Image (cartoon, helix red, strand yellow):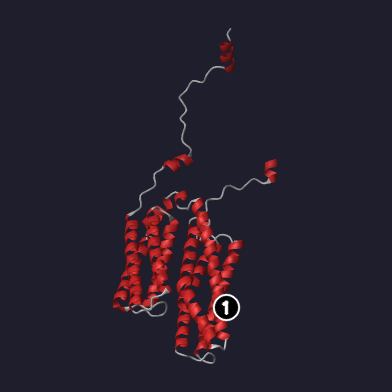
Amino acid sequence: MSTTDRTERSRGPRAVGPARVVRPAPAAAAAAAPVPRPPTAVGWAYAMVIVATLAAIASNVFEIAHQVETGVAGAATTGDLALTIAFCALFGFFAEMLRAGRQWGRVLLTVFTSLGLLFTGLGLARLGGRPLVGPLQASLAVTSLIPSVVGLVLLYVPSVNRWMASVREDSRTVSQRLRKAVLTAHVGISVGWLGLVTGMFAMSVAGATTHNAEQQAAMYRTMSMLDEIFLGMTSMFALITGIVVGAGTKWRLLHRRWVAVKFFLTMGVMVLGFSVIHQQILRANELVDEGAAVRGGALDTVGWTMAGSALLALLCLVFMTAVSTYKPWGLTARGRRNSPAKSARAPRKDDRQT
C-alpha cells in the first residue's frame, strides 16, 4: 500500500454534496452598496442657498463701496472684504458638502442661514448691527431673505431626511486627518476669542472708571478697532470649526448635552456681541466725538453696560472651556433615540460560572 493510499484512507470518505456558496460579509456588502442619489429637494435647496448667498455678498459689496466713496474706509473695510471672500468660499463648500450627503454640511448651512436671517432682520428693523445703506442694499437684503427661508425649509423635507438617513455613516463624518486639523484650528481660534473678550472687558472697565478724557477715548477707539476687525471674525470661525468638530465626528451636534450647550452658548455670545456690545461701542465713540462728559453723564451708562455685557460673554466662554474639559451630563433625548441598539445584557459573573 502506498503512502498516498494510507493518507486517503486515514482521511475517510469525502462528503459528496453541492458546493458551498460563500456569501460576502454584511460589512462588505454594505460597503459595495451604491450611495442613493439625492432627491430633487436637495438640488433646489442648493440653488436657493447660492442665490441667497450671492444677494448677501452683493449687499456687503455695496456697503464696502459706500464706505470707500464717503472716505470712511479703513482697516475695518479691509476686514469686511476679507470676510466676504471667506464666506463666499465657505458657503460654496458647505453647499457642495450638502449635495455629497454630509450631515455636518447641512447643519452648517442651517446655522448660518438662520444667523443670516436674524442679522438681516435686525438690520432691516434697525435694531442692531450695521445700517442698510439706501434702498438698493435693503432690496438685496430682502432678496436674500426669501430664498434663505425657502432653502431652509427644503433642507428638512421628508425626502431629504430619508436620504440623509440612508447615506452611509462614514460619508457623514470628516476624516481623521481633517478632524485633527479642524480641532487644532478650533482650539486656537477659541483661545483667541477668549483673549479678545477678556481684553474688551478690561478696557470697558477702564473706560467706565477713568476720569481722564483722553484715556477713555483711547479705550473706546481701541475696542472699536478690535470689534470691527477681529471679534466678529474670530467668533464666526470658532462657531464654524466647532460645528465641524461636533457634527462631523462621533460626538454629533445635539446628541450630547455638553456639545449642545456649547453650541447654543456660542450662538448666544455671538448675538450678544452683535446686538449689545457692538452697539454700545458705537454709541460710546459717538458720545466721545460729541465731547460728552467723562463722568456723570450718558457715558457712565454706556460704559457700565459694555462692562456688564463683556463680563457675561467672558463667563460664558470660560464655562464652555470647562464643559469641553469635563464633558458632563451624558446623552440628550435626541442622542438616546438615535443611539445604536444596545447589545444583549452581558452575562454576569455568576452566569458565566454556571
Image spot of residue 56 (x, y percent): 35, 69
The residue positioned 45% from the left and 81% from the top of the image is 282
Whether residue 243 is situated above or below residue 201 in the rendered picture: above
SS for callout 1: helix
Label 1 neighbourhood size at 10 Å, few (<14), some (14-19), many (20+)? Answer: some
The residue positioned 52% from the left and 83% from the top of the image is 305
The total number of labels drawn is 1
Which quadrant of the view contains residue 207? bottom right
Q: Is residue 64 left or right of residue 249?
A: left
The residue positioned 33% from the left and 66% from the top of the image is 52
Whether residue 328 is situated above or below residue 30 in the rendered picture: below
Whether residue 352 is situated above or below residue 248 in the rendered picture: above
Q: Is residue 172 left or right of residue 336?
A: left
Whether residue 91 is situated above or below residue 6 in the rendered picture: below
Q: Nearer the viewer, residue 31 or 88?
A: 88
Image spot of residue 312 (x, y percent): 55, 76
Q: Is residue 144 left or right of residue 204?
A: left
Q: Nearer the viewer, residue 316 or 195?
A: 195
Image spot of residue 17 (x, y percent): 47, 22
Q: Residue furthest top?
A: 1
The residue positioned 32% from the left and 55% from the top of the image is 40
Q: Can you see residue 352?
A: yes
Q: Nearer the viewer, residue 326 or 205?
A: 205
Which residue is identified by label 1?
202
Q: Amino acid at mark 1?
A: Ala
- Looking at the rendered image, the quarter that the N terminus falls into is top right
